[in-house]
Image (cartoon, grey):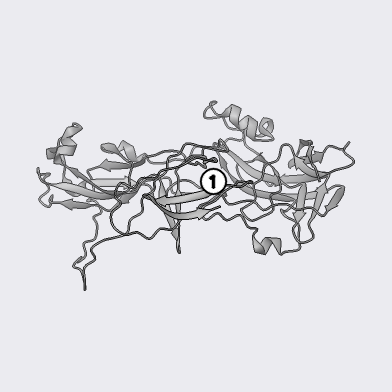
Amino acid sequence: MIPLLIFSLLTYSSTPSGLDINYQIDPGLRSLGVPDLREGTIEEPPGYPGVKTVSFLVGVPQKGRITWQYTKGFTQKIEGVDIEPVRLMDFDGKKRPEESVYNENRYYPDPVSVEGPFNFRDLRVIRVKLAPIRYNPVTRTLIISRSISLKVKFEKPGLRRPRRSSIFEPILKELILNYEECQGWRIGKVPFQNQFSDGPWYKIAVAQEGVYRIGYPDLEAVGINPRLIDPRTVKIYGSDFHTLPRGTPITFVDTLIEIPTFFQGGGDGQFDLNDYLIFYGRSANWFTVIKDSIRYNLNPYSDTNCYWLTWGGTHAKRMELIDGTPRGEPKTHAISIRHIEENEINLARSGLRWLWREILFGDSLYIHHPDADGQIDLSITLFSEATRYLPLELFLEDNLIFSDT
C-alpha cells in the first residue's frame, strides 16, 4: 500500500469545570491507503509498533485532582498491514520487535494517555497523547478513529497570579493548547534557602572522571589566602544525579549534596603549605554497565560537570579510611574504559543522539588508541542501514582480522 498523508484538526472549548478537546481527521477523506499523520510523531518505546501519535500540553489549575474521559467516533480498519517496530539505535544493533508486544492480540498504543499533572515553568500542566491510528501486530490490522473527544475536568478552579517573567511566554503559548485560558494560573514562589548566600563558594569544572587534588598553591593561584581557612571545614558539593530524565517528570531535591573528601593534614586547624584536599569527580558523560553490555551516555547539555568548594561552619564529611593491603597475589593491571568518539553528526537535529561520521562505499576510518600495549581481546559490533551491497574489512595494524563481502 502507498502511504497517504492525513491532515487533522485539533480544537477545544472551555467549560465551567474543565475543557472539552476534539480531534478530527479530515472528514472529507473517504478512502485511505496506509495513513501517515502529518502532525504526528513516533513516541513509542523501541520494539513497539512505529505508529505516529499527536501530543500536546494542557494547562490546569494549581491545585486539585484532574480527571478525564474520552469517546471515539467512526472507526475504519485496514487489514494486511506491516508496521515496523521502533528501532533502538545503539551499539548492540537491536532492531527486532518486542516479543511481549508483537505476540499480544491488541491494538497499540492506547487511544488516549495522560501524564501528570506536573509543573512546567510556573504553570501546572498535563501531557495528552492521542492515537487516532493504532496497530494490532498479531492480526496485522490498522484501526483508524476519525475523531476522538476528550473531556478534562478540574476539581478546583484556577487562581490568577502575576507572572514572574515574560521571557518564556512565546514558548508556553506555542506548547500549551489552552494557553489563553490558563496563562494567569501561575504557581506561587516556593520559599527556599540560598546555599550560596552563606560563606564563599567557588565553582570547579570537571571534564574527565577521576581523582582531583586541591592544595595550598592551587588556592593561592586564584587569589585565596589558605591561612585564613580552617581546613577541617573545607567541603565539596555536587549533585547526586547525572541529567534530568526526558520522560515522566521526577521530583528531585532542590539542593546540593556534600561529597565526602580526603584531607591530608589540617588536624591542627591550620592550612599549611603541604596540606591538600582530594575528591572524586565525575564527568558530565557516563557509562552504564548492564551484565556484559556497556552503554555510553552523552550529556546533551554540557561537556563539564560542576562541583562547588566552600569552607566555614561545621566540619566537613571525610572519606572512610580502610586497610588497602592486598590479600594474596597483587594484581599488576586493572581494566578501564576509554571512549574514543567525536560528536559530528546529529541526524535528527535534536542535539540528543550524536554520531561520529558516515561511512560510505570506499571510505576508511582509522582509530588510534594512544595507550595500547600488549595483547588484547577484541569485540566489535556493527550496525548498518545499508540497503545495497557493502563490503567491509577490519584491520588491526596491517593485519586483516575480519572481512564481510
Q: Position of residue 222 (x, y in %)?
A: 20, 32
Mark 1: secondary structure: loop
Work out whether residue 65 can be spotted. no
Identify which residue, 117 or 259, lies in the foreground.
259
Work out whether residue 265 can be spotted. yes
Q: Position of residue 86 (x, y in %)?
A: 64, 51
Instruction: State the residue at coordinates (34%, 46%).
Output: 238
- In the image, farthest residue toward the bottom: 328
Q: Is 9 rendered above or below residue 68?
A: above
Which residue was labeled with disc 1?
246
Instruction: State the residue at coordinates (23%, 63%).
Output: 332
- The answer to whether residue 39 is left or right of residue 161 is right
> Across the whole image, how many numbered discs are drawn on residues?
1
Q: Position of residue 141 (x, y in %)?
A: 80, 55
- For badge 1, the amino acid type reads Arg
Identify which residue, 172 or 63, lies in the foreground.
172
Q: Is 266 rendered above or below residue 203?
A: below
Identify which residue, 43 or 22, lies in the foreground.
43
Identify which residue, 246 or 81, lies in the foreground.
81
- The answer to whether residue 214 is left or right of residue 393 is left
- The answer to whether residue 38 is left or right of residue 170 is right
